[in-house]
Amino acid sequence: MDDSARCPCLSGETYGACCGPLHAHVVPAPTAERLMRSRYSAFVVGDAGWLLETWHPSTRPDELELDPTVRWFRLDVLRTDRGGPLDDRGVVEFAAHHRVDGVAEVQREVSRFVRDRSRRWLYVDGVPG
């Protein structure tokens, strides 16, 4: 994705100022919400490696194949609970809007995040919101 393009997570920043540096391993996610936004952007740009890398080992699948027919087009962050720079755990509730075969759908999820020993945020799991 072009660094000057609008970031898919709809933060209002460009990809190069928002999720791009996280995907390129230039900076770590400072909060659980930023990690969640970068994971959403990874679905948009097709970066399964980033999704697996940021998934907690206790719940991470061995492999991940993204469906190329799904078109992600909008992310709404509905709620955050903790997950700040000084926290070790956090929750982010979101709605991810997408199209499958031209049909609009919404995935609502309440996702849990933890920091590992190196202080990186990791996605643990999510339940429908």
Image (spheres, grey):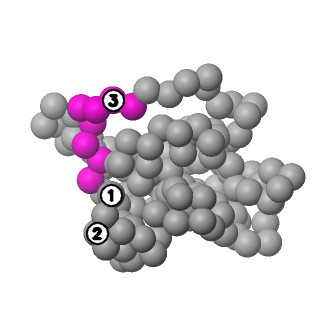
Q: Position of residue 35 (x, y in %)?
A: 58, 58
Q: Earlier in the sequence, mark 3 or mark 2?
A: 2
Q: Verify CB contact (< 8 Å) between mark 1 and mark 2.
A: yes
Give the foreground label among 1 and 3.
1
Q: Residues within 10 Å of mark 2 (few under 14, many from 20)?
A: few
Residue reaching furthest to the right:
117
Would residue 86 appear left or right of 113 to someone viewing this image?
A: right
Task: Say which mark, if any, is on residue 67.
Answer: 3
Say if 93 sits above or below 67 in the image. below
Would residue 95 appear left or right of 31 to someone viewing this image?
A: left
What's drawn in magenta, residue-wise?
66-73
Mark yes or no: residue 81 visible: no
- For image coordinates 46% across by 63% down, the residue present is 20
Q: Secondary structure at mark 1?
A: loop
Mark yes or no: residue 8 visible: yes
Q: Is residue 67 magenta?
A: yes
Disc 1 target residue: 1
- For image coordinates 39% across by 62% down, the residue present is 9
Q: Amino acid at mark 3?
A: Asp
Disc 2 target residue: 5
Q: Amino acid at mark 2?
A: Ala
Q: Is residue 55 magenta?
A: no
Residue reaching furthest to the left:
102
Q: Position of residue 68 (x, y in %)?
A: 28, 32
Q: Verify CB contact (< 8 Å) between mark 1 and mark 3.
A: no
